[in-house]
């Protein structure tokens, strides 16, 4: 094509109207650079487009690998509407085919691709000097094959268009060379699906799927608008598509007497393995698709394979195989290129989220507002293979904060979430659901539940149920992580067991209470929230919490979960919201001790021993004491000792005796009970022995213990007395309740 056809008529420099063209001309005429020469100016359609043609010098290496000349003739095309980047067209007819060229019609000049960014961003800082420098840089690097970085993704074999075909990420034409294609219209957009959501929908096209041998990336640069040109493209890769098309037509279709298939329009799908150079291995596989204007029976006729019968007396599909097969004019098979998009699998989702892919099996308990949104975040990042456990259905009020909308009302939470997540990521992220109450499975459900909880890599507990976390802690299940909000929604709590499960959810729960008791930042965090009633039953109530908080905390939780599963240690994390500021507390977890006393287990840690020891040291040479704080779990027969109250001010501390007072003690214990919603209570007594004395209980100690036992037996809970001596040595006197 000549310049008049491409760029319009010659124009005077004084008549330029396009701003960027005028700026470039100003730069060229005011520049004495010997490497830059103005050749001519052209305009088309009353200055709708203005073209400046230049000769531009290129600083090539002495030994260049691509035929880039020391001076190149270039047309720079500017649009009046400035909607698209100025075109950079290489006017030399034999300019080489290289990576990083824009898609052009056949016989048009080669078009350089200078930017990966959108033009809307580029034009904010566009200048003539930068523009020309970018062109020179493109040519210089291309001459030495340096433009495409070693770690940069390979360029497509054929550049794409703007129509979309959705195919599975792991599709292999070798496994299925014929497949139905479905069409969806949305405004001016047309999307084609290889595997649509609605499997019963009638297909619109039939695809012939072909896999070609490995080829070097980025060597084709024009649009094939008919099948003959497409064949020529693949012939450059030493592959004749006619052979494969003929094979598929014979084998796949003519053996099937299915006239409906033969009347469908044909789409070609090509699988193209790409290499970086002629001797390298395949790095990735690209897929390309073309819609034809021919039905399958017409294509078969063009390829000389079969033809339609006119004799209705012959009982067949109406088509016969020709004995002599001659291929007709393939230029008559017009093509429209379609851009292929892959369904989102777990690996791609992880890459989109800039995180590592994580495929370990996980059981998630509780698909409520918080759980559903946290799992949603994790699923969308390709995280985990999930089993969901919950007995509830979606109710109308759930739509205020739950991941799922109101159209799921009346349906099982776990089944609905499974469908939602598996439609979000094309990788069966949820492989099973258990629609049951984890604490009350029937006999048929119990075996499966036990198998699930024991054979996962992790259990995530989103139930916000103390009973559930205690149940998980008391059994030999997988490593567990519990995530919940405080009643006011202002604190997010994550407790994670260590990988050996030495520190379990129940003890981490106690450490949370300890933080509530001792950390002024969260002292009121467990107070009861405002209640919303959504039904007539006394149980039809829900806490009033903002969806803003659920959305925010689910983001914090999913991010922290990824960190926790990559570690091995136990953790108690507390996130506090104060206005628009979030404060993070990582609680200290010290070594724990478990003592078996008859049918009960007593659990405490080094923190408790250190705190009692400090009180003892400060009171020496006198004895001192106080009360023990903790929790009795009557279901699993565990006594948790988590803190103490030191000696009241009216106590009598002597070198060889201690008499605990009562001043203010009741109010302190009551206050702690209220802070911890009744979970931390008075559980026993402690006192010290002076230096030089054993930690064996004295007669007075035993008398005190009998008094304690009388009190504790009233509620059928154990009696516990702790004695501390030198070097943090301790003894515990305990007694089971009478009943």
Image (spheres, helix red, strand yellow):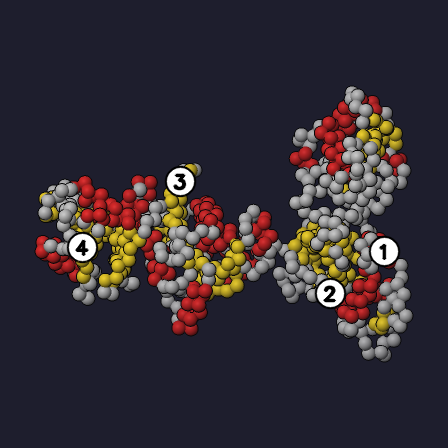
Q: Position of residue 410 (x, y in %)?
A: 47, 62
Question: How many labels sit on residues?
Answer: 4
Instruction: Name the residue located 87 percent from the left edge and 66 percent from the top edge.
Output: 304
Pointer 3 or 4: first along the chain:
3
> Which residue does the numbered mark 4 point to in the structure image?
721
Q: Nearer the viewer, residue 152 or 20?
A: 152
Q: What is the spatial separation of the Cα atoms under label 2 and label 3, in whole angstroms?
A: 57 Å
Residue position marked by numbered label 2 in the rendering: 178
Residue at image coords 81%, 51%: 224
Going from N to C along the chain, the mark reached first, 4 or 2, is 2
Q: Indicate the secondary structure of the residue bearing disc 2.
A: strand
**219 to the left or right of 325:** left
Q: Earlier in the sequence, mark 1 or mark 4?
A: 1
Q: Which mark is residue 228?
A: 1
Secondary element type, mark 1: helix
**Secondary element at image label 3:** strand
Say which residue label 3 marks. Answer: 583
User: Which sits earlier in the primary sequence, circle 1 or circle 3?
Assistant: 1
């Amino acid at each position: 094509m000549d310049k008049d056809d491409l760029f319009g008529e010659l124009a005077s420099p004084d008549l330029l109207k396009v701003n960027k063209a005028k700026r470039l001309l100003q730069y060229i005429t005011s520049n004495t650079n010997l490497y830059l020469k103005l050749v001519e100016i052209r305009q088309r359609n009353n200055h709708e487009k203005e073209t400046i043609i230049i000769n531009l010098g290129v600083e090539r290496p002495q030994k260049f690998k691509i035929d880039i000349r020391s001076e190149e003739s270039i047309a720079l095309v500017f649009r009046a509407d400035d909607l698209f980047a100025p075109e950079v067209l290489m006017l030399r007819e034999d300019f080489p085919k290289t990576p990083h060229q824009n898609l052009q019609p056949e016989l048009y000049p080669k078009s350089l691709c200078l930017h990966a960014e959108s033009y809307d961003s580029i034009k904010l800082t566009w200048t003539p000097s930068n523009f020309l420098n970018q062109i020179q840089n493109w040519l210089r690097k291309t001459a030495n094959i340096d433009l495409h970085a070693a770690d940069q993704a390979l360029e497509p074999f054929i550049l794409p268009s703007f129509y979309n075909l959705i195919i599975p990420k792991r599709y292999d034409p070798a496994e299925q060379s014929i497949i139905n294609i479905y069409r969806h219209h949305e405004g001016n957009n047309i999307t084609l699906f290889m595997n649509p959501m609605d499997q019963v929908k009638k297909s619109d096209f039939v695809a012939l799927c072909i896999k070609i041998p490995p080829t070097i990336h980025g060597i084709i640069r024009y649009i094939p608008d008919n099948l003959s040109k497409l064949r020529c493209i693949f012939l450059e890769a030493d592959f004749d598509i006619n052979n494969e098309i003929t094979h598929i037509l014979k084998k796949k279709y003519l053996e099937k007497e299915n006239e409906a298939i033969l009347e469908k329009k044909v789409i070609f799908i090509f699988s193209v393995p790409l290499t970086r150079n002629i001797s390298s291995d395949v790095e990735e596989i690209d897929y390309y698709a073309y819609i034809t204007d021919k039905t399958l029976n017409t294509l078969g006729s063009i390829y000389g394979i079969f033809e339609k019968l006119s004799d209705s007396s012959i009982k067949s599909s109406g088509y016969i195989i020709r004995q002599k097969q001659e291929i007709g004019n393939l230029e008559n098979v017009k093509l429209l290129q379609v851009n292929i998009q892959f369904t989102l699998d777990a690996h791609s989702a992880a890459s989109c989220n800039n995180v590592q892919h994580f495929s370990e099996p996980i059981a998630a308990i509780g698909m409520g507002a918080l759980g559903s949104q946290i799992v949603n975040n994790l699923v969308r990042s390709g995280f985990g293979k999930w089993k969901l456990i919950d007995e509830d259905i979606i109710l109308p009020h759930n739509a205020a904060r739950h991941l799922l909308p109101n159209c799921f009302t009346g349906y099982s939470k776990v089944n609905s979430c499974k469908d939602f997540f598996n439609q979000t990521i094309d990788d069966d992220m949820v492989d099973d659901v258990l629609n049951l109450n984890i604490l009350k499975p029937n006999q048929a459900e119990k075996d499966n539940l036990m198998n699930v909880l024991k054979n996962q890599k992790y259990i995530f507990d989103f139930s916000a149920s103390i009973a559930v976390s205690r149940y998980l802690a008391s059994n030999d299940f997988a490593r567990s992580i519990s995530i919940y909000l405080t009643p006011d929604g202002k604190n997010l709590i994550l407790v994670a067991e260590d990988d050996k499960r030495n520190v379990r959810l129940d003890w981490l729960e106690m450490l949370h209470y300890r933080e509530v008791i001792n950390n002024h930042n969260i002292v009121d965090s467990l107070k009861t929230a405002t209640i919303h009633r959504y039904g007539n039953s006394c149980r039809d109530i829900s806490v009033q919490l903002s969806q803003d908080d659920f959305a925010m905390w689910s983001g914090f939780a999913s991010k922290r979960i990824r960190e926790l599963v990559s570690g091995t240690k136990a953790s108690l994390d507390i996130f506090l919201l104060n206005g628009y500021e979030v404060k993070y507390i990582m609680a200290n977890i010290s070594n724990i001790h478990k003592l078996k006393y008859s049918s009960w287990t007593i659990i405490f840690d080094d923190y408790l021993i250190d705190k009692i020891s400090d009180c003892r040291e400060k009171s020496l040479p006198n004895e001192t004491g106080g009360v023990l704080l903790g929790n009795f779990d009557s279901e699993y027969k565990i006594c948790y000792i988590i803190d103490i109250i030191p000696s009241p001010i009216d106590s009598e501390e002597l070198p060889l005796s201690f008499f605990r007072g009562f001043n203010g003690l009741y109010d302190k214990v009551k206050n702690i009970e209220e802070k911890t919603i009744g979970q931390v209570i008075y559980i026993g007594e402690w006192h010290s022995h002076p230096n030089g004395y054993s930690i064996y209980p004295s007669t007075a100690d035993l008398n005190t213990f009998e008094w304690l036992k009388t009190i504790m037996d009233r509620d059928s809970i154990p009696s516990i007395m702790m004695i501390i001596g030198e070097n943090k040595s301790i003894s515990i006197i305990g007694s089971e309740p009478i009943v």
